[in-house]
Image: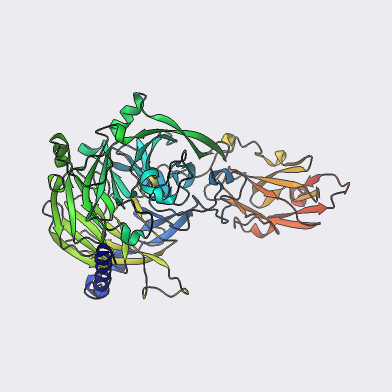
Amino acid sequence: MDLNYKKTAFLLTSVAALCFTACKPGKVGQNTDADAAKKVYVAPGKYDELYMFASGGFSGQIAAYGLPSGRLLKVIPVFSQNPENGYGYSEETKPMLNTSHGFVPWDDAHHPQLSKTNGQDDGRWLFINGNNTPRIARLNLATFKTEEIIELPNVGGNHASPFCTENTEYVVGNTRFSIPLDADKDVPIDSYKKSFKGAASFIKVDKDKGTMNLAFQLIIPGFNYDLARAGKGPSKDWIFFTTYNTEEANTLLEVNASQRDKDFIMAVNWKKAEALVAQGKGKKVPAKYAHNVWDEKTHSATSTIKNDVLMLDVKDYPGLVYYIPCPKSPHGADVDPTGEYIVASGKLAAVIPVFSFKKMLSAIDNKQFEDQGTETGIPVLKYNSVLEGEVEKPGLGPLHTEFDGKGYAYTSMFVSSEIVKWKLNTREVIDRIPTYYSIGHLSIPGGDNKSPYGKYVVALNKITKDRYLSTGPELTQSAQLIDITGNKMKLLLDFPTIGEPHYAQTIPAEKVTKNQVKFFKLEENHHPFAAKSEKEAKVVRKGNRVDVYMTAIRSHLAPDNVEGIKMGDEVYVHVTNLEQDWDVPHGFAIKGSNNAELLVMPGETATLKWVPDREAVFPYYCTDFCSALHQEMSGYFRVSPANSNIAISYKLGDNPLAKK
């Protein structure tokens, strides 16, 4: 057996043993705040202080929670169909899930990222990555809706994504699994080192509207790229990615990607890349990808397939990229509030290195490089020339670090199941608190901002054995709310989450609520099939297509009797909610529809396509309880044989009360 293989296997076995012995979490009571219930209680009629937006992991969605209560407020559909409101089922939203592979109604969502102004969360937009079919989505926090999704070509596994620059000039994504570029698709897998490349994607964001455009991609070595953070303040023109598999292995990565003592932090000068693009550098390369955009005026989405992308090969542009050695297989790369320090560490390392941005620039100026034998053509800075210092014996399995703005850093320890608090300037461990269990990411409100504004840290855990009522072979995912206002961290709350909560970002509620839309104005509804009053309700046949212009208002649908539909017809029911008041959505569903229901917001129009499967009378009704007479809000479609001579007819019956 290969000696390196034996060494790696021994290390993994040793860490696993430590995980279940010396590093078992402490007792709950030792770290729980005696007034925890009081501190997380939000009385009826009162509001939570913060919104927490957590990734839904394998659900492909985003979940919005209130903190400190931990109450789930809304599941926001992004990459996956959602029958609760018809997202991905309605004719208007189907284009949002289009890709170069066709209609893809699911994904694996990992890293929410709030938009920023001057390095502070501004409450306008939320970005999230689709890890599987590489995509980045933008949500509008005024409506809590997904407004845009852009696919990333040349990328396999969009994990180091989507991290935004100090003023949201760009959101950036990078490849988890390097692959052959789209223009060179069919190559032997064992030609990895020759044929496989990474592609760092820079998406330009309009500063006023938020609209996205894939500005350029950087061709980088075929490593695996894990996570990233943009710089701030003095480092604002840079972004820092963690890498692993610098061995460029293509099989049994558990061992073959752990041979080297160090992998890298990849430091990219995005401002220089932007300048090169402005000078006409780089070249257009064939690449097929989808760009999907929601239009709030028409309440509809469009999908456009793009066919090329501008690419710059970093080896052709010295000074664009540098590597900083880092203990092997690092996960998070986190920049402190001042923008001076970059924190990253190997997942199995016994220290947490803290790197200095000033020292990095000095090392570049003085050409303090070393040979790491990677043959990439990219300069590798000497470890000690960039290192500010190391946190000694922090725990086992350091993953992610965030900051409280008071000079302290908090690092999640996956293997030893704990959060460790340490002082940034001295790198001294100050406190530690157990988590339950196997924490991945952690999140401090504003923890990646220039001025963090949180008094909590949230642990996002992978395992919940013995924490909740069981739910069969799979247990609920979980988060833990921890008070960090004192010298000692105190556990306040456990609460379940949807999917796997890889990461979350938290923001004061008032930064979001001040912009929120309460209803859509009917006069601004430009949907082509909108019926803005009951007088406009109608049914129109064109060949075997039948369009039903329907209105909904408390407490009836118009029309509520439709005849003349025939077998073989395609029926499009366009429902316009006539309400002009906050929180009065209406639903719509048809018996036997193999689609989903609709949930139509006040002033909005949504369309359900229905192909009748038999001759019958089909009830339809409102699915969202809207008034005392909600049950009466219904109607009938009559479906006749294909050769029937029954003409289209529709009505809303006479109101006997109106005649009195």
Query: In this view, which residue lies farthest toward the left?
Result: 426
Q: How is the image coloured?
A: rainbow
Residue 60 image position (x, y, % from top left): 47, 54
Q: Position of residue 12 (x, y in %)?
A: 27, 67
The image quadrant where one finds the N terminus is bottom left
Query: Which picture quadrant has residue 369?
Result: top left
In this picture, is 280 found above or below 324? Answer: above
- Along the horizontal axis of the image, is 179 left or right of 347? right
As drawn, the residue found furthest toward the top would be 279
Specify whether 101 is left or right of 637.
Answer: left
Q: Which residue corresponds to the image point at 43% horizontal and 51% vertical from the top-left?
A: 189
Q: Number of labelled discs?
A: 0
Q: Nearer the viewer, residue 3 or 450?
A: 3
Residue 207 appears in the picture as rendered: no
Q: Quadrant of residue 108?
A: bottom left
Q: Position of residue 300 (x, y in %)?
A: 58, 40
User: To which quarter of the image does residue 82 belong?
Assistant: bottom right
429 or 398, nearer to the observer: 398
* Res 622 seen here: yes
Q: Position of residue 156 (x, y in %)?
A: 43, 48
Instruction: Give the left or right position of residue 299, taking residue 457 as reference.
Output: right
Residue at x 18% of width, y 42% of height? 357
Q: Is residue 491 above or below residue 343?
A: below
For this view, does 329 lie left or right of residue 65? left
